[in-house]
Image (spheres, rainbow, N blue to C red):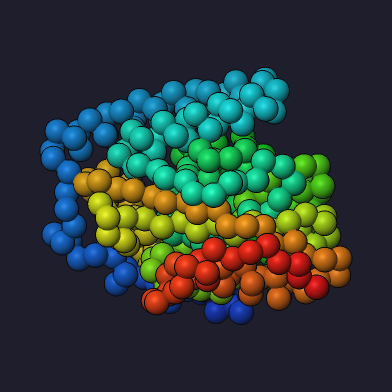
C-alpha cells in the first residue's frame, strides 16, 4: 500500500530513479480543473467540516483504548469509525460482492487515502502500508490499530521479511489488504500490479481476492478524489469535502486460488486484469464477472 504516494510525494532523487520504486503516469494533470467540479452548498460543506473534526477527535481518543480490547472488538470499533468518517465528509459507499472474512489476500487498485477508510469500513482487514503512513494524523493510528504490516520501500532488502510477515498473518486467518500498484493513480486507467506480495498468498496457501474501487461524482466517474502528484493530504481532504454527491463503489470479485508453487507474476497479472476490466472501454459482462480460477 502506498496511500497518497504519487511521484511528488517521494523523498530522494536517487530513490525516485530506482527501478524498484513504484511509479505511475498519473499526476496533477489528472485532477479536474478548478471550477469544473460541482460543489456542495456552503452550509453542507460547513457541516461536513464540523462533523468530520468531531468524528476525527473521537476516533483519535478511541485509538488510546483500542489495545485494551480483544481483537474482534478492536476491528469492530475501527469499522464503525471508518464508516463514520466517510459519512461525515459526505462519501457514500456501495459494496458489491462478498468480501473475505478470514485467510485471504485482498488486492485492490489505489486511488486515494480514502481507500484505507473504505477497506477498513468494509471488512476486518490488516493493511500492508508504507511506513510513512504510521505517522499520518489519525489514519496512521487507525492503520496501526488494525494490525498493519508496514513496508519500508527505501530498503528493498527488507522486502522478503515483509512478505514473510504478511504470509504469517494469512496463515493465522487474517485478511491482509494490499495495493499492489505500490502507489496511487487517478483511477481511470489500469496499471501494473507488482508481484512481490502475491508470494505471501502462495506461501500461505490462501486465496487472492481482487477488489475494484471506483469513485463517482453523482453518476459520473471522477478523478477529483485522487491523491496524486504533488498533492498534499490537507489539499486532498479539502477537495473531497467540497464535492457534491461523492460516491465510492467497492466490487469484490471471485477469489483466485493459486496452486502450490504458482508463479507470483502470473497471479499478479491475472488479478490486475480483473481489477482493470471496469476501467477499459467496451468490456463485456463476462469479463467483469470472472469465475474462480486455479492458477498453476
Q: Quadrant of residue 289?
A: bottom right
Residue 20 shown left or right of residue 92 in the figure? right
Res 103 seen here: yes
- Quadrant where the N terminus sits is bottom right
Compared to residue 278, the image places residue 168 above or below, namely above
- Quadrant where the C terminus sits is bottom right
- Residue at position x 30%, y 28% in the image: 51
The foreground one among 70 and 212 is 212
- Residue at position x 63%, y 74% in the image: 269
Location of residue 161 in the rendering, given as x and y in whole percent from the top left corner:
79, 58
Q: Quadrant of residue 90?
A: top left
Res 149 seen here: no
- Residue at position x 20%, y 66% in the image: 33
- Residue at position x 67%, y 20% in the image: 68
Location of residue 151 in the rendering, given as x and y in whole percent from the top left corner:
66, 56
Q: Quadrant of residue 268?
A: bottom right
Location of residue 156 in the rendering, given as x and y in whole percent from the top left corner:
70, 67
Residue 117 shown left or right of residue 64 in the figure? left
Amino acid at each position: 500500500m502506498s496511500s497518497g504516494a504519487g511521484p511528488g510525494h517521494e523523498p530522494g532523487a536517487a530513490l525516485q530513479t530506482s527501478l524498484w520504486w513504484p511509479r505511475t503516469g498519473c499526476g496533477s494533470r489528472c485532477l479536474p480543473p478548478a471550477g469544473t467540479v460541482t460543489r456542495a452548498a456552503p452550509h453542507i460543506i460547513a457541516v461536513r467540516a464540523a462533523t468530520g473534526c468531531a468524528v476525527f477527535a473521537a476516533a483519535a481518543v478511541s485509538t488510546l483504548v483500542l489495545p485494551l480490547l480483544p481483537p474482534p472488538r478492536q476491528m469492530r470499533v475501527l469499522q464503525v469509525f471508518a464508516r463514520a468518517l466517510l459519512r461525515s465528509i459526505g462519501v457514500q459507499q456501495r459494496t458489491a460482492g462478498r468480501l473475505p472474512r478470514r485467510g485471504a489476500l485482498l488486492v485492490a487498485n489505489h486511488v486515494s487515502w480514502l481507500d484505507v477508510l473504505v477497506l477498513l469500513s468494509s471488512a476486518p482487514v490488516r493493511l500492508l502500508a508504507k511506513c510513512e503512513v504510521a505517522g499520518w494524523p489519525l489514519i496512521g493510528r487507525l492503520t496501526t490499530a488494525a494490525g498493519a504490516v508496514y513496508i519500508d520501500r527505501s530498503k528493498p532488502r527488507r522486502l522478503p521479511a515483509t512478505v514473510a510477515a504478511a504470509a504469517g498473518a494469512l496463515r493465522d486467518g487474517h485478511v491482509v489488504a494490499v495495493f499492489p500498484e505500490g502507489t496511487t493513480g487517478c483511477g481511470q486507467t489500469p496499471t501494473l500490479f507488482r508481484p512481490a506480495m502475491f508470494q505471501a498468498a502462495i506461501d500461505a496457501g490462501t486465496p487472492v481476492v481482487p477488489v475494484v474501487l471506483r469513485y463517482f461524482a453523482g453518476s459520473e466517474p471522477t478523478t477529483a478524489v485522487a491523491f496524486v502528484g504533488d498533492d498534499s493530504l490537507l489539499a486532498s481532504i479539502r477537495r473531497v469535502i467540497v464535492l457534491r454527491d461523492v460516491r465510492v463503489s467497492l466490487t469484490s470479485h471471485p477469489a483466485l486460488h493459486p496452486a502450490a508453487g504458482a508463479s507470483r507474476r502470473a497471479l499478479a497479472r491475472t488479478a490486475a486484469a480483473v481489477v482493470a476490466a471496469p476501467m477499459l472501454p467496451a468490456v463485456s459482462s463476462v469479463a467483469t464477472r470472472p469465475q474462480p480460477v486455479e492458477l498453476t
